């Protein structure tokens, strides 16, 4: 990993750790309403000010990070898992199964991701698990496509043939010989895609489909406070910056992983 | 060429049948009944039954589907469960707005993205390249619903030179189009940069340079012409996806387009609206792809209509 990638990974992990420790480090409760301090501009006591219910914005941004980062990473991992399974089966066995699975993949990729995620998330009661499910239900398709492609080329390589000729079964070939070859590829893909997961998670929160009030997520903070953008911009700017910094770090990390992966192959 | 286009349009009809069938099956198979969201779960069974008959969900899936298809073949799309307005009428009002927004965003994004990408690739590793690449990845990381709000705060609420929201002429279009163009320009910049970096390594570029082609001609004709295919693909794909709905941008700026319409339909389980949006979305997506494929044919003499068939 290059300097860029290391710095990005450091930023994300420190943000996540800070968000887990938010309530220990800061004297405020993220959800406690304080009617004496409504819409306070930034000050020493409240570095980012307070919101419409007197809650400390810094505390809420930090504790929201727990959900925003956690849900995005979890959804990316689930997508990767489903994508690996589907891609391995589809690429290895081919035939009608492949045709069916890839038609499904094409169908999912043909719809605008956000609308599809909205569609999946209205099927379940709103909450963080719903967001996770919606993000993975849309996200697995591109992983599956990628894994399938790489399985197709791996299948023809002689060591697979050698494995088969010494009597390895399909399961053993898939799990022991092909799967490990796909892992670096999907990890790189996950790095590239994570920024997008963060943005979609935020968008679903913004549209009111994520964790419900009073729980803070970055997206829901922006939508709840956007009517005050003119009189109290400090309520809207920090969660947006938090989303941007996180997505940017993930994107830079992904770029870095890809560069190294590509140069490693050539 | 004509055959190619006809064949693709035939495929579109098949695709529409498939997609409507699938969406129909999915909306029925999934939990949640639109009747409950219309009248509430505590209404008397008689009222629920009456509404079911009115909107036709009491019949079997198959006869509902046949009913819908014959409706569409007669140039109708049914009525919204909520507003009782004709879905087709709504779409005819909203689609041109979405088209305007998508075209506006692309008109802004294309020159910026392509020029920045070309310049960054030609000066690879320079400070300009680093700044342009940094800007583009930042633009891809900022959520549009936030950049839209920041633009609105600055231009509408502080400077008061543009209206904050609503649908209308250029003054209304400008802010949402700029918002939507940011990630589009960033994607274009990145794809142009990568493509040009590949092209400048090719022998024909060295030949052109050796025979004394001017720098401008080299960049504009020899390099850009070869970079067009991926660039046009990205423009087409982005444009197609905006036609399916720039949900967030339309929501922020109160733009009366397809994206918001589709989202409201999904949130309320307004099936005729969802189906209508999926139909129009599929048609515009396929036509956009068709246009891109036809453009390939003009941009690259190696591509034949036969060769672009998949």
Image (cartoon, coloured by chain):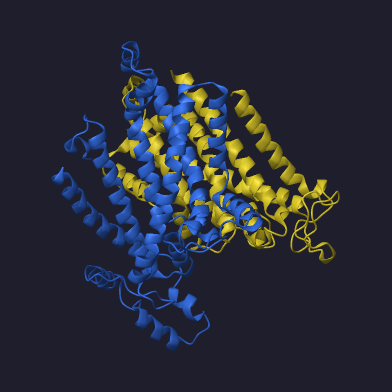
Residue A205 in the image: state x and y as whole percent.
59, 56
Please tell me which residue lies in front, B119 or B214.
B214
Quadrant of the image containing the C terminus of chain B: top left
Q: Which quadrant, please, contains the N terminus of chain B?
A: top left
Residue A132 in sight from this viewpoint: yes
Question: Looking at the image, which is closer to me, A237 or A1?
Answer: A237
Q: Where B93 falls versus B209 (above or below)? A: below
The residue at the point 33 percent across, 60 percent down is B280
Q: Quadrant of residue A217?
A: bottom right
Query: In the image, what residue occupies the spot 45% across and 44% down?
Result: B108
Number of disc labels: 0
For this rendering, which residue is in front, B196 or A23? B196
Instruction: Report which colour depicts chain B.
Output: blue
Residue A149: quadrant of the picture = top left
User: Vertical placement of B180 versus B164: above or below?
Assistant: above
Q: Determine whether, in the image, residue B169 is placed left or right of residue B148.
A: left
Coordinates of residue A204 in the picture (x, y in percent): 55, 56
The residue at the point 40 percent across, 56 percent down is B100
Q: Residue A191, how many percent across, how many down?
A: 54, 35
Q: Residue A85: in sight, yes or no?
A: no
Q: Which chain is yellow?
A: A
B98 shown above or below A254: below
Q: In this view, does B308 lie to the left or right of A166?
A: left
């Amino acid at each position: 990993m290059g300097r860029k990638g290391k710095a990005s990974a450091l930023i994300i992990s420190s943000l996540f750790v800070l968000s887990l420790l938010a309530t220990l480090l800061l004297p405020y409760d993220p959800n406690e309403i304080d009617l004496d301090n409504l819409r306070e501009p930034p000050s020493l006591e409240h570095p980012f000010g307070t919101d419409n219910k007197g809650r400390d914005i810094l505390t809420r941004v930090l504790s929201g990070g727990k959900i925003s980062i956690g849900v995005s990473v979890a959804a990316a991992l689930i997508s990767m898992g489903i994508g690996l399974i589907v891609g391995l089966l589809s690429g290895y066995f081919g035939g009608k199964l492949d045709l069916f699975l890839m038609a499904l993949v094409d169908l999912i990729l043909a719809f605008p991701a956000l609308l599809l995620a909205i569609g999946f998330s209205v099927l379940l009661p709103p909450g963080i698990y719903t967001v996770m499910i919606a993000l993975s239900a849309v996200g697995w398709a591109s992983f599956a496509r990628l894994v399938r492609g790489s399985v197709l080329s791996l299948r023809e390589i002689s060591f697979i043939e050698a494995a088969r000729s010494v009597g390895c079964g399909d399961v053993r070939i898939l799990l022991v010989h092909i799967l490990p070859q796909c892992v670096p590829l999907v990890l790189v893909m996950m790095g590239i895609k994570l920024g997008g997961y963060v943005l979609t998670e935020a968008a679903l929160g913004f549209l009111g489909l994520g964790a419900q009030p009073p729980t803070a997520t970055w997206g829901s903070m922006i939508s709840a406070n956007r009517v005050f953008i003119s009189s109290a911009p400090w309520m809207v700017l920090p969660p947006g910056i938090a989303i941007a910094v996180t997505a940017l770090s993930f994107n830079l990390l992904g770029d870095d992983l890809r560069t190294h992966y590509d140069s490693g192959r050539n | 060429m004509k055959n190619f286009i006809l064949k693709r349009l035939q495929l579109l009809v098949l695709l529409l049948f498939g997609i409507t069938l699938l969406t129909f099956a999915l909306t029925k198979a999934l939990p949640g009944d639109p009747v409950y969201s219309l009248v509430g779960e505590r209404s008397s069974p008689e009222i629920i039954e009456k509404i079911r008959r009115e909107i036709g969900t009491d019949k079997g899936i198959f006869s509902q589907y046949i009913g819908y298809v014959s409706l569409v073949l007669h140039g109708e799309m049914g009525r919204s469960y909520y507003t009782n307005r004709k879905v087709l009428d709504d779409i005819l009002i909203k689609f041109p707005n979405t088209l305007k927004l998508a075209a506006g965003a692309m008109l802004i994004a294309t020159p910026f993205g392509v020029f920045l990408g070309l310049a960054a690739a030609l000066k690879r590793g320079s400070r300009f390249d680093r700044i342009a690449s940094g800007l583009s990845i930042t633009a891809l990381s900022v959520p549009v619903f936030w950049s839209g709000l920041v633009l609105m705060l600055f231009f509408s609420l502080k400077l008061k030179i543009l209206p904050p929201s609503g649908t209308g002429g250029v003054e209304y279009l400008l802010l949402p189009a700029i918002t939507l163009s940011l990630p589009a320009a960033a994607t274009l910049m990145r794809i142009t940069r990568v493509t040009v970096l590949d092209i400048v390594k090719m022998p024909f570029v060295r030949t052109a340079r050796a025979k004394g082609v001017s720098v401008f001609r080299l960049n504009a004709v020899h390099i850009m012409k070869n970079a067009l295919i991926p660039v046009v693909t990205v423009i087409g794909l982005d444009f197609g996806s905006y036609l399916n709905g720039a949900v967030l941008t339309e929501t922020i700026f109160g733009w009366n387009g397809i994206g918001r319409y589709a989202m409201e339909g999904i949130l309320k389980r307004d099936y005729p609206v969802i189906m209508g949006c999926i139909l129009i979305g599929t048609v515009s997506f396929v036509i956009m792809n068709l246009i891109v494929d036809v453009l390939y044919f003009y941009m690259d003499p190696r591509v034949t209509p036969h060769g672009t068939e998949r």
